[in-house]
Image (cartoon, rainbow, N blue to C red):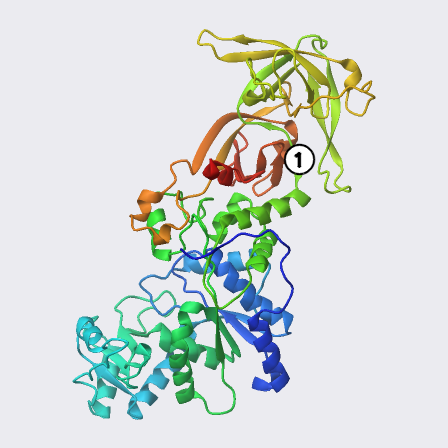
Amino acid sequence: MSDINLTTEEPKRSLNFIEVAVENDLKEGKNDSRVQTRFPPEPNGYLHIGHAKAICIDFGIAQKYGGICNLRFDDTNPVKEDVEYVDSIKEDIQWLGYDWANVYYASDYFTQLWEFAVQLIKEGKAYIDEQSAEDIAKQKGTPTQAGQNSPYRDRPIEENLDLFAKMNEGYFEEGSMVLRAKIDMASSNMHFRDPIIYRIINHPHHRTGKTWQAYPMYDFAHGQCDYFEGVTHSLCTLEFDVHRPLYDWFIDQLKTDDYRPRQYEFNRLNLTYTVMSKRKLLQLVKENLVNGWDDPRMPTICGFRRRGFTPESIHNFIDRIGYTKYDGINDIGLLEYAVREDLNKKVTRVSAILDPVKLIITNYPEGETEIMEAHNNPEDENSGSHNVLFSRELFIERDDFMEDAPKKYFRLTPGNEVRLKNAYIVKCTGCKKDDAGNVVEVYAEYDSQTKSGMPESGRKVKGTIHWVSTNDCFDAEVRLYDRLFIVENPSEDERDFKELLNPDSLKVLRGCKMEAYLKNAVAGDKFQFQRTGYFCVDKDSTLDNMVFNRTVSLKDSWAKAKDK
């Protein structure tokens, strides 16, 4: 397994290797000292956290060096593409805090790409091959053994031109023929062994309809679209490193002056307990193993957004892991640390009881209530406070009472004292159970001289617990999300990845008791539930049933459980 990166140190601010290359290009005056990048997603699915890393470098480089970054959809495979994905990609980019200079599509350049392919045919650098995909693959050879020439490699130019035109006119079935670049079947780089550059797809395109039936391959379209668009720095992930010589070869055939885009590769973002394969993510959605692309357990950007992550936490995480030329796997704990760190500074603390049991303060006057002040965020002195209602009957967490407690249990147990947060010190006097032996009520007495902010006669207690008043709390649904897989690297596990799903990745709690302050919260609002974790309001919330998603626990409970 690759090394796992887990560090909570502040991100280094030294230049990464891409920034060094850009600054060198600017010093040398390459491409008229312009900086132009692009983010080129294929609209065949929702973006995931790995794409966020690409977005940050593509748009970030342009921002830092006064350039522009375009959004370009690589829509060269109409079978898998959809307008739904186009819209979601735009939303994700803007949520991360970026905007594009222009929106382009590879399909904008279909005519220019076609003309370039015709140019290659006329120059004797491309030919129509009628072999099956299996035969073509067999003839490619191996990295140590040269490939074999196609029997169609020396087809006459005029015949190639005629067949190429007919490929796009619906004369031939899918898979019956392809256009291949004629380069070098003995090259040590397998991508140079007469790569396929056009294939037939008889499927309507979401923008061009049935205008085209021959579509360019990614390796052919990518660099040329960069060139047509004026891109100077084409940034992509490491798997394209071996494609770069082919990228440059096509540019060499196309360029007419000193301008040329240059490709730079950086490491992918891989996370523990996660899969990034679009195919597997699509399978999770289609087989209803998750509740859609924005399920908060998914590594999609919209999934993280729905779960309560912030753009700042994503940026801070990516800054920490950095951009290198070496692939590895990053511990998801570092991403969780980043969102804890960000939310801790920003969000209001509230009381929410997830597993409630009633606490009755027997010596508190019946029918009386009082207002207590709760600070919104002790990390932010300007965050203010809000009022909470205190009454004789409260709800507390069931775990905060134990009838027969061990010695170092500092919460409610008969004879023990605790502080009710923002209120009084109380002493537990006993409990009531139902016929099954379950505790249904806990009893305590309060000390009226120990209200928060009052002198406490020097008396201290070791435990503090949170609570809500039965007078004004309301019921809500809470969804406890956890890691989707039970193994650190499901992509390297030989078992079917569906067998590795965590059965406890979602627990739904109903009848949770929320303090009244939360009644006016709307979808996306974020809070810290005291002593529990960070939560946000889910889009499924209604006036009658509010739903809260756990973003992350207060501490890394997963690591503790794993170490046991």
Q: Closer to the camera, 252 or 209? A: 252
Out of 452 and 323, give the one closest to the viewer: 323
Measured as percent of width and height from the top left, residue 506 is found at: 43, 36
The answer to whether residue 474 of the structure is visible from this angle is yes
In the rendering, at what x and y percent does residue 445 appear?
69, 10
The residue identified by callout 1 is 349
**Number of numbered callouts drawn:** 1
Element carrying mark 1: strand
- Residue 538, placed above or below residue 33: above
Pick the quarter of the image with the N terminus. bottom left
Where is residue 366? Give x, y as percent.
70, 8
* Image position of 491 with respect to 486: above or below: below
Residue that appears at 31% across and 93% down: 123
Where on the picture, by quarter, is residue 201?
A: bottom left
Residue 451 quadrant: top right
Relative to residue 312, is residue 138 drawn left or right?
left
Q: Residue at x 51, y 71 (%)?
A: 38
* Depicted 34 relative to depicted 14: above or below: below
- Along the horizontal axis of the image, is 440 left or right of 125? right
Tell me the residue at 61%/31% (across/down).
531
Neighbours of disc 1 within 10 Å: few (<14), some (14-19), many (20+): many
**Residue 288 seen in this snapshot:** no
The part of the image, by quadrant, that contains residue 501 is top left
Position of residue 269 measured from the top left corner of the image (x, y, whole percent): 47, 59
Task: Identify the amino acid type marked 1.
Answer: Arg
